[in-house]
Amino acid sequence: MIPITPSDPSICALPVILFEHPFNERVRTYLRLEHLFRRFEVLVQRDHPIDHHFAFTTLFEIVEVGGRSDLKSDILKDLERHKQQFQSYRGNPSVSEHMLDQLLGRIDESFEAFNTASTRINQFVNDNEWLSALRNRLAIPGGTCSFDLPSYHCWQQHSPQQRREDIARWSEPLRPLHACIDLLMGLLREGGSAQKVMASAGQFQQNLPQGRFQLMRLRIDPSLNVIPEISGNRMMVSVRMMVQDDTGHLQPCTQDVPFEMGLCG
């Protein structure tokens, strides 16, 4: 399937819980970064100083996860691989040349911006004494009291708009990484296909074509009150449905559980 058309909106509109499971460490890192960037955006848009405090916590988590030495190389290789794949669709009558040009332009733009960015994702923190001090104090439980970091306490008294502008300015170096993660995960998901399956007596297992898939997506009706335990790799995937008792312990589900499974590669 050529991932340049929108996903089926009827699938996204269903009242379901979505679970995603990566089949390799690279996609696992992409998912972590995507999760953190989404949380960061939500927190920054709020007004309370406590929300912006946890925006900083999330920002430093992004720096930590994004600091993997091979991450930049992995991202650039994935972008180049997608570019070559889509260029091979030139002249295909079933592919819109306009949409293809737009997608290739976005890939080129993301590649160039990320390739020219600073090699070290944490450089902007290390170069800012105030951010470095805040990061160190956040690692200590309760370490950002007014007597620990008076300057941070003063900053929290600024208007919400001023704080948002400051955070936006400080986090600007992460924009190329954010754009690449959004693009790569969007392409990966759009390239998948979904099917309705059944976990018989709470168990489901399926062999996979070797090396073809990188991500599994499960959609489950929340009224079923089940929690999937997913394990797998590029060869096989296994799902065991669990139910949570009153004490919080998970117990195996023995009922048949329908769900939707998507495999993306």
Image: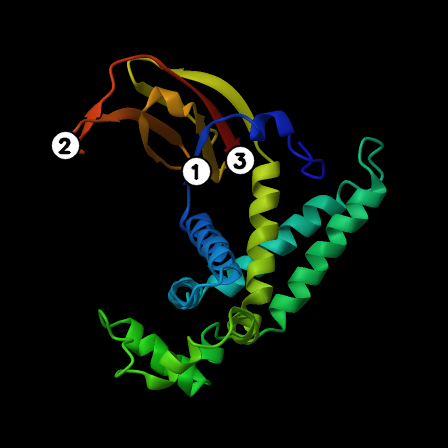
Q: Name the residue: 47% across, 38% down.
A: 215
Going from the N terminus, do you reach mark 2 or mark 1 first? Answer: 1
11 up-or-down from 67: above or below: above
Along the line of sight, the residue nearer the viewer: 229 or 152: 152
- Give the foreground label among 2 and 3: 2
Position of the C terminus, as image quadrant, is top right
Label 1, residues with CA under 10 Å away: few <14, some 14-19, many ≥20:
some
Q: What element carries label 1?
A: strand
Name which of mark 2 and mark 3 comes first in the sequence: 2
Numbered disc in front, either 3 or 1: 1
The structure's colour scheme is rainbow
In terms of sequence position, does the residue under pointer 3 or pointer 1 come before the other? 1
Please tell me which residue is depicted at 35% across the width and 20% down the height of the picture: 224
- Residue 241: where, in percent of width, then height? 30, 24
Q: Position of residue 190 (x, y in %)?
A: 61, 37
Which element carries disc 2, helix, strand or loop? loop
Kindly identify which numbered label has been placed on residue 247.
2
90 horizontally vs 2: left or right: right
Q: Residue 39 at x, y = what percent?
A: 46, 54
Disc 3: CA contacts within 10 A as few (<14), some (14-19) or many (>=20): some
Task: Report the residue marked by disc 1.
Answer: 20
Q: In this view, does 76 lie above or below 261?
A: below
User: In the drawing, does residue 42 fall left or right of residue 198?
Assistant: right
Nearer the observer: mark 2 or 1; the answer is 2
- The quadrant of the image that shows the N terminus is top right
Q: Which residue is drawn at 38% across and 64% down?
A: 50
The residue carrying mark 3 is 264
Residue 259 left/right relative to 101: left
Q: Distance between the residues labelled 3 and 1?
A: 10 Å
Q: Position of residue 72 (x, y in %)?
A: 52, 64
Amino acid type, residue under disc 2 in the picture:
Thr
Q: Measure how far apart labels 2 and 3 are at the Cα level.
A: 36 Å
